[in-house]
Image (cartoon, grey):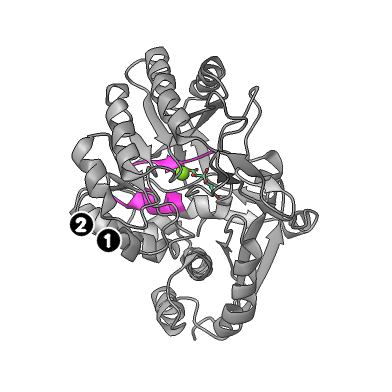
Amino acid sequence: ARDSVVAAEVLVTSPGRNYVALKITTAEGLVGWGDATLNGRELAVAAYLRDHVAPLLVGRDPARVEDTWQYLYRGAYWRRGPVTMTAVGAVDLALWDIKGKATGQPVYQLLGGAVRDRILTYTHATGWDVPELLDSLDARREQGFRAVRAQTGVPGLDTVYGVSRGGAAYEPAGRGAAPAEEIWDTDAYLRHAPRALAAVREHAGPELKLLHDAHHRLTPGEAARLGRSLEEVDLFWLEDVTPAENQEVLRHVRRHTTAPLAIGEVFNTVWECQSLITEQLIDYVRTCVTHAGGISHLRRIAALAEIWQVKLGPHGPSDVSPVALAASLHTGLATPNFAIQEYMGYEPRTHEVFRHDWSYADGYLHPGDAPGLGVEVDEALAARFPYEPAYLPVARRRDGSMTDW
Ligand code: GCO
Ligand code: MG
């Protein structure tokens, strides 16, 4: 007889920052975990799962991972979008976890087995000025990282997203009932960033893989100029130069720079990636295993990208939970065109709530060999960290108008 789902429960916890986890339990007593965290919109996904998805899962055969994906995606009528796709992704992860536990295999084995021994990872270095940034970079290199994303402050601005001051850790979302408001000045950024990144390259030498994230703030013309001014810096990738809602604008950027481009952390399906991939307008697709519908859908994006020699470099800051990171690593170990995994690290409390088998060593990550995804949630501990509203900041230009992001 087939096993069946008896419960699908949503857990919201905040061990340092907010996470949403989905727990699926089967009649045979197997438990699968999924990540449903959508930074700043956590409770919308929690409600979507609790009110509209959990009741549909009860009684279903947990082995039917693909059919459940199709049922939730096609069956909803209202397709795509971050809330829907994160919910679908959470279910997909939990079901892959159960399939692994049911068969005694780590998920990467079920995806065809390892095509590599370990997964290259990049982390973040941040400093308000160049000396601070170089200190941060050196600290990362001492931890063994071979690839680092470098972000710096901008003279004349008080704050810059993703950049801390004085060596403090930075967190993508700030606690509070409303987002912080920051001032942004693209001209000042474009004057400063190429100089700061050139200094980083000079300091780091030629081998370090260097990345930079423009956070969707530029027009195609500005992006082309930035790419061109960074060519000597020899970036591993330049990320999110434009909002990329209009994918055609990337043609202009491509025409003017050979800087490798990475886009897609806010995309939710293969459809948003389609022309970026098939026109070879990007080098790396950044879709995240949770926000893009789970392992089942990330594999489809990877398959399309593979044909066009586009590689995967999934999103993985601290707002992507250790469950999602595990799922990304299982996918990465078994996917030929998986290039690199972002890894920002977590607070100690987060590691305690999400006990994981994946590990970091010497600039590389490995998903581990525990059956399933290899992450168990300490529910008693999780309950001690209740949800607190937290939002990404928003930015306005000097005239008070909102920036793209
Ligand atoms: C990255 C991202 C993050 C996001 C954040 C949004 O490349 O890691 O751009 O800094 O902005 O995860 O929730
Ligand atoms: Mg980014």
Tell me which amino acid carries mark 1: Gln
Q: Is residue 303 visible?
A: yes
Please, is residue 42 above or below residue 359 in the view? below
Could you say where residue 48 lies in the image, as x and y percent from the top left? Answer: 59, 74
Separation (CA) of disc 2 from disc 1: 6 Å
Indicate left or right for 54 with 370 as reference: right
Q: Is residue 381 magenta?
A: no
The residue that disc 1 covers is 274
Q: Which residues are magenta?
A: 328-344
Residue at 26 percent across and 59 percent down: it is: 303
Could you say where residue 209 lies in the image, as x and y percent from the top left? Answer: 36, 28
Tell me which amino acid carries mark 2: Thr
Q: Is residue 149 visible?
A: no
Indicate left or right for 291 with 6 as reference: left
Could you say where residue 349 lies in the image, as x and y percent from the top left? Answer: 71, 44
The mark found on residue 278 in the picture is 2
Question: How would you rate the neighbour count of disc 1 (Cα within 10 Å): few for under 14, some for 14-19, many for 20 or more?
Answer: some
Residue at 55 percent across and 51 percent down: it is: 320
SS assignment at label 2:
helix
**Mark 2 and mark 1 residues within 8 Å of each other at the beta carbon:** yes
**Ligand 2 closer than 8 Å to label 1 CB:** no
Question: How would you rate the neighbour count of disc 2 (Cα within 10 Å): few for under 14, some for 14-19, many for 20 or more?
Answer: some
Please, is residue 205 above or below residue 10 in the view? above
Q: Is residue 330 magenta?
A: yes
Could you say where residue 396 lies in the image, as x and y percent from the top left? Answer: 56, 44
Depth check: give the residue in front, 270 or 253: 253
The mark found on residue 200 in the picture is none
Q: Which residue sits furthest front? A: 399
Could you say which quadrant of the image residue 389 lies in?
bottom right
Residue at 49 percent across and 32 percent down: it is: 361
